[in-house]
Image (cartoon, coloured by chain):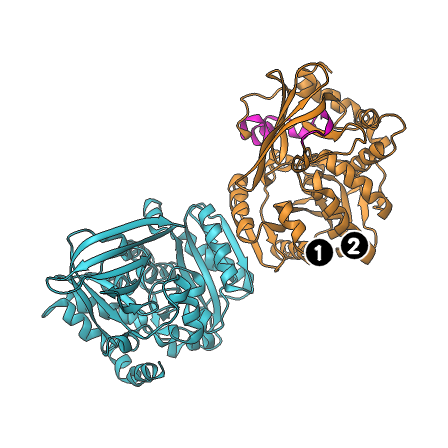
Chain colours: A cyan, B orange
Amino acid sequence: MMNSVDQVNAGVNNSTSRTVETGKIRLEDLKDIARGAGFLGCGGGGDPYIGYLIAKAAIEECGEPELISPDDFDDDGVVVGSAFIGAPSVMQEKCISGEDAVRTIRRIEEKLGRKVTALISGEIGGLNGMLPIGAAARMGLPVVDADGCGRAVPAIDMTAWNAAGLKPGPVVLVNEHLDTVLIESDDPHRAEDIARSAVAAMGMSVMSALYAMSGSDMKQASIPYTISIARGIGRAIRAHSKSPVENLLDYLRTTTHFNQCGVLASGKITYVHREIKHAWVVGEVKIQPDNGDAAEINFQNEYLQLKKADRLLATVPDLISVVDSETGEPIAAEALRFGQRVTVIGASSAKQLRTPQAISNCGPKRFGIGEHYEPIESINNW
Amino acid sequence: MMNSVDQVNAGVNNSTSRTVETGKIRLEDLKDIARGAGFLGCGGGGDPYIGYLIAKAAIEECGEPELISPDDFDDDGVVVGSAFIGAPSVMQEKCISGEDAVRTIRRIEEKLGRKVTALISGEIGGLNGMLPIGAAARMGLPVVDADGCGRAVPAIDMTAWNAAGLKPGPVVLVNEHLDTVLIESDDPHRAEDIARSAVAAMGMSVMSALYAMSGSDMKQASIPYTISIARGIGRAIRAHSKSPVENLLDYLRTTTHFNQCGVLASGKITYVHREIKHAWVVGEVKIQPDNGDAAEINFQNEYLQLKKADRLLATVPDLISVVDSETGEPIAAEALRFGQRVTVIGASSAKQLRTPQAISNCGPKRFGIGEHYEPIESINNW
């Protein structure tokens, strides 16, 4: 495992120079960021198109927010994670005022007795890649070009921040009525349990502020450059000079975190089973290639593992993402349909999600799908 | 209905002079207060003996707290309701540090930016009649001789405070790990829903601080003198010069709120059904007299209604309490057993729980047991 981390480290200088563009988050980049957030959502995290609409409305009303590199951020600044928690399907039915996210930050400031100086996405994957952009626009705050996961995860204690020893609390939740819940706990897992229950009672759709941290903690514990990378992924899919899937893989190979990547399966969806369990979308999908063994993916909001002929080819926290074979557009677990022609792309997760603590928080054992984690590039000899 | 309220009002001056003794809450009075709180618990509210042990330990460690009449309280003082929320059976299994209740008050002070000057019991019935006494002892604060219900109720939006237009929030919940949840909502019913869910995730046993209010609001909206009345009830049962049940009724007739009272049924328990539904103890009990029709009581934590030969004789919010026919000791719904010889006592609820708003909050319709409320004294021609 150390080998893979070393390889990732070795790629940092080369790749970041190519992917990071700070300055303003431009309105015309939002769709690319959303598409990239969809890919990094690994099937979950909610529809980034909804996040796109919310961020777009906020920017049109309040202007483009500043995108600030984590490297340039003041060590003594106060950064707060911003994220939607709940059922994206419920969120789509409700009106989002934007006021809810602003309220979460104001309550954190009241609790800390300090002004928040920047927002950061709790998870870049899915709609949470977009919502902090909208909140930052409304508040006139910069967004840090980084996030807490480098993908989407289904629980607030599964972040790289928690793996690095930062606490999620105080966690503030605000729903569409502006009902407000503030949670403090020394134990990230209990904080998650309490937040999850409160979210259900609050109507399954809340904005949260969490993991308030100093600039220096943010630099140490976050996954850097992920808004820029999401934009790069979106561009790569859109600008398909050759096959968009090949283009996407070429781009991923240039990134800091996701450079160990490849096609895990390709074919037609021949089976989908989906059910709601504990407010998660749980199920499995089978993908049959024209020749050879079918691939099976289990999901719980996000794609958890992929097997071919009972051989495990990828597990969380590594990225498994299903895209349309022709267009390269990412497909959420909720949108999988019988007969779709899809390609499954696997990629290394950020090294911050591969530490022993992170693997314990969000590796296969946490999801009950296996005892041990093996990096995707080692399984597949990439 | 106005008649009954007028009668209650007419009794105030006479009765309070006989029941109120302020000064210190004395250690030797705790058992009487607990027994009275058991009666006023109407079958629910948790075992006051546990509350007695907790209050006793706090007083032995920190001294007797002051009992202050609501009439003497500073209009500009800050009073906060204190109450256990959860499953009393779980609470009995866990260690109570006393630190949890103190923490709830400290967090309310932090939120209000003001010092709390007295505690008040959220509900006098059951263990919540006792716990604020222990918390006040630990904090060196006085306890107001009053409460939010004049009985026990199963939800935080069923208080007389809410009926009078006061808001439960900010509600602070603290469990044995000192995990802390602060809830703000304009809507008391949503505040209850959110608190109930949070309590479940926090381990079904938390101390709460709620209904922070000014001294003048407290005077307008609370049920006065109920700690003194609980002590009086306890004494009346203990000092059974003649039958303790008769003695108890004689005492109740002297009180401000519960003076319309009588025996609703007496006999042997021939049937008990109890189940756990949504963290409530729900069920029914049948009491067969030596001659005549059996009485049936439905309960949801508290006794909700009593019928004899399908004729309704009492419903919430009026008090229905089951006592041992021989000793007069109150029997909680959880402690009902086949073969027990019991007497069911009914009494008028405080007038503050009989306003149209209060009847809507905690009358028969709220519990799904009937459309209309009729005062117990009018049904029974007392």
Query: Regarding mark 1 in the picture, which secondary structure is present there?
Result: loop
The answer to which image quadrant residue B179 occupies is bottom right
Labels 2 and 1 share a subunit? yes
Q: Is residue B277 above or below residue A157?
A: above
- Foreground pick, B261 / A126: B261
Q: Is residue B364 magenta?
A: yes
The image quadrant where one finds the C terminus of chain B is top right
Tag 2 and tag 1, C-beta contact below 8 Å: yes
**Residue, disc 2:** B57
Q: Is residue A24 visible?
A: no
Q: Along the line of sight, which residue is nearer the eye, A263 or B79?
A: A263
Q: Is residue A144 left or right of residue A314?
A: right
Q: Which residues are magenta?
A: B338-366
Q: Position of residue B39 (x, y in %)?
A: 74, 34
Mark 2 → mark 1, Cα distance in angstroms? 9 Å
Q: Disc 1 sits on a residue from what chain?
A: B
Q: Quadrant of the N terminus of chain B?
A: top right
Question: Which amino acid type is shown beneath numbered disc 2?
Answer: Ala
Answer left or right for A170 relative to B88.
left
To which residue does mark 1 refer? B98
- Residue drawn at x 79%, y 31% is B328
